[in-house]
Image (cartoon, helix red, strand yellow):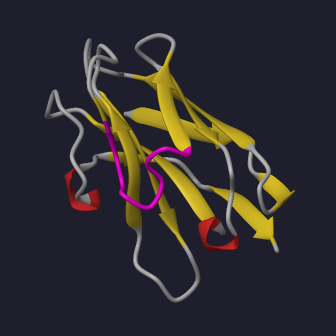
Amino acid sequence: QVQVVESGGGLVQAGGSLRLSCAASGRTPSAYVMGWFRQAPGNEREFVAGISSNAGVTTYADSVKGRFTISRDNAKNIYLQMNTLKPEDTAVYYCAVDVHYRLPRRDANEYDYWGQGTQVTVSS
């Protein structure tokens, strides 16, 4: 079993920045993809960013490209640096692990393990 824990959410004004962290632990394979998703009230969970096992490949949703940066400091920890935040970025942000593929995918159904989520609120 793999445990996934996010941290770093909070309340910030529009134009501000936040940094989310995610740690995976437990019976993790030697290489796996990690990603960030978000879900606002009344909306489906949507892909934000993903990173390959060796951090060589990153993928972003068009809505965050140029403002958010996903990074990985080892096999088990990833981060999401969020700059120039907008009110529409308000959502619960989830970290997820995909143990079956080597490149980040955008479909939430492809991910095997999920964190509990962390709230990000951007005020206007």
Residue at (36% x, 22% y) in the render:
27
Question: Magenta span covers which residues?
Answer: 59-67
Q: Is 24 within the magenta?
A: no
Residue at (46% x, 10% y) in the render:
74
Location of residue 83 in the rendering, given as x and y in whole percent from the top left corner: 67, 45
Location of residue 20 in the rendering, given as x and y in whole percent from the top left corner: 65, 39
Residue 89 in the figure: left or right of residue 17:
left
Location of residue 56 in the rendering, given as x and y in whole percent from the top left corner: 28, 17
| Depth check, front residue: 56 or 31 | 56
| Depth check, front residue: 49 or 62 | 62
Q: Is residue 93 above or below residue 111?
A: below
Residue at (46% x, 19% y) in the render:
76
Residue 57 in the figure: left or right of residue 116:
left
Task: Name the image quarter holding residue 49.
Answer: top left
Residue 50 in the figure: left or right of residue 10:
left
| Depth check, front residue: 11 or 112 | 11
Main SS of residues in magenta: loop
| Depth check, front residue: 36 or 13 | 13
Residue at (39% x, 66% y) in the render:
46
